[in-house]
Image (cartoon, rainbow, N blue to C red):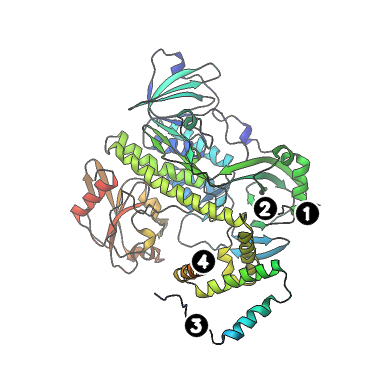
Amino acid sequence: MTDLILTPNLDNADDFYATLLAAHEGLTKKESDALHARLILILANHIGDNKLLEQAIEAARKAG
Amino acid sequence: MNKIFETPLYPYRRAPEQDEERIMRHKVVVVGAGPIGLAAAIDLARNDIPVLVIDDNDKVSFGSRAICFAKRPLEILDRLGAGDAMVEKGVEWELGRVFFGEREVYRFNLLPEAGHKRPAFINLQQYYFEEFLVRRLRELEAEGRPVEIRGRNKLAAIGAHEDHVTLEIDTPEGPYNLETEWLIAADGAGSPTRRMMGLDFVGKVFEDNFLIADVIMQADFPTERWFWFDPPFNRGQSALLHKQPDNVWRIDFQLGWDIDREHELKPENIDRRLRAMLGEDIRYELEWSSIYTFQCRRMETFRKGRVIFAGDSAHQVSPFGARGANSGLQDTDNLVWKLRLVIEGNAPESLLDSYDFERILAADENILNSTRSTDFITPKSEISRILRDAVLDLSAEHEFARPLVNSGRLSVPAVYDGSPLNTADALDGPAISRPGAPCPDAPLGEGFLLERLGDRFILLTIDADAPDEIEEDGITVTRLALSVRDDTTGALKRRYLGDEPSAVYLIRPDQHVAARRPSWNENLFRAAIRRATGKE
């Protein structure tokens, strides 16, 4: 079983973060919330492994 | 206006007990002549178990009510002798359309799996279904089978004893008493039997109201199912349109919990909703309208000594997925063969405990599914609405999101995993036919497998040897010998063998798998028969 990657894995962290922020530019809170929800669903489908997704949800929950 | 549901089909007649001093004891009494009570009575009567049905009414259901019948219940109805009438009259649809807000987000074609005698489901008004069942019951009565139905016989009091149940029954000519060895309470969600016995539901999960309108439409609407999330004509709620026979269209408007029933039922308000939904110029006739309230809940146990609950009296679900009448028919299918063996003295009374285990498992699965549908259709929090709307928005663009759209997961039969009647799986075969599973159908020459299984214990052999018949402590098991050579479509191999070259299946009278192995083994199969009849 593959484990959730929780060590640095992005090609270029700064670029990704800037892209994420740019996607929200000019959006209302409501529009941003909707964008986030769509993004999560797209990424979840790409991962396609419930076990991994459960680990991701758990990691997100614990870090807050 | 359809007159079927206004005609008395089993009018009140004076019963012998009303003129007798002595109290008569019946074998089985069924309370309630709805779909579940009638199915139970037909199944018992075909097996020559004497059965009396009492009902406080004398007609079929008022209005269409349950309108979607899934494949497994249709297969059960085939066995009861009512499947053809259902399928001939029913409407099949394959194209579904999903709307979100003002727009259509996607369409889907169901493309049902080939190699089954019966379709995935049909739409048919409950009153037709009940009419077919009453007709079948009358046929059995005419053949001399021990079945009787008494209209306008209302249960007034019940007394539960160790080996019988006493009943007081009200009629238009006053009350009378009778006794019965067994009582099947199929008297609906508001079950008077349940109430009188002081039993109630546990685990209320959700509640909602639906405005149901059956309209006869002049316009030629396609035979499709349309489902709306948050439509402009019913903001924040859902709506559903689908077709029934006779150009009757069922329209469901979800209303939410806190509503003004009288206001919603006013014809001008229904008319306003219909025109907003279907267009101002629509021509229609309103056949029936009603407000339907549901809760998701079940009784803690479905059996209390000699009283057994089946259908809505035992469990209730939301209408999403058509899991009400469909699961009720599977209750009686599970119950009747067990009750027959107990009454005939070929199984211990404890066999009936497995009814509780198996049908509670099914009820919990139905409640889980219909609760998930409800959570999708009516999001409970801001974030669940955001996620739901995201799924719907994505579904318009991307196929991946469509399986997440949940407007009801169609009723499929439960697999009785972990049932005390199952023998551990000894075949490396397909999961679809593992012990506890309902037998999947498969084409066999001109006919189908399920027709050949019937309603007795069967030893199904596929390219394997076994005796043609064995008897184990009063239970006769007959062999059905098949070979992949006769399996022209490959469905038998796919559904029962997988990569195995041969298999022997022990199949219960309700066509669920009890045990399976690659080959015959007398001791192991005798043990499996004992186990499947509550003797181990």
Q: Secondary structure at mark 2?
A: loop
Distance, label 2 to label 1, CA atoms, is: 19 Å
Query: Which image quarter holds the N terminus of chain B?
Result: top right
Q: Secondary structure at mark 3?
A: loop
Residue displayed at 44% across by 18% down = B17
Labels 1 and 3 positioned on one and the same chain: no
Kindly check if marks 1 and 3 are in contact, taking CB atoms under 8 A apart as contact.
no
The Cα atoms of the two marked residues, 2 and 3, are separated by 44 Å
Where residue B223 appears, as percent x and y from the top left, is 64, 56
Disc 2 to disc 1: CB gap under 8 Å: no
**Residue B28 falls in image quadrant:** top left
Residue count near mark 1 (Cα–Cα under 10 Å), binned few <14, some 14–19, many ≥20 = few
Between circles 1 and 3, the one closer to the viewer is: 3
Q: Which residue is mark 2?
A: B237
Q: Nearer the viewer, residue B274 or B117?
A: B274
Chain containing the residue with disc 1: B
Residue at the spot of label 1: B279
User: Of the numbered discs in the image, which one, if any, rests on residue A8?
Assistant: 3
Mark 2 or 3: in front is: 3
**Residue B4 vs residue B65, the one in the foreground:** B65
Reading the image, the residue beneath label 4 is: A61
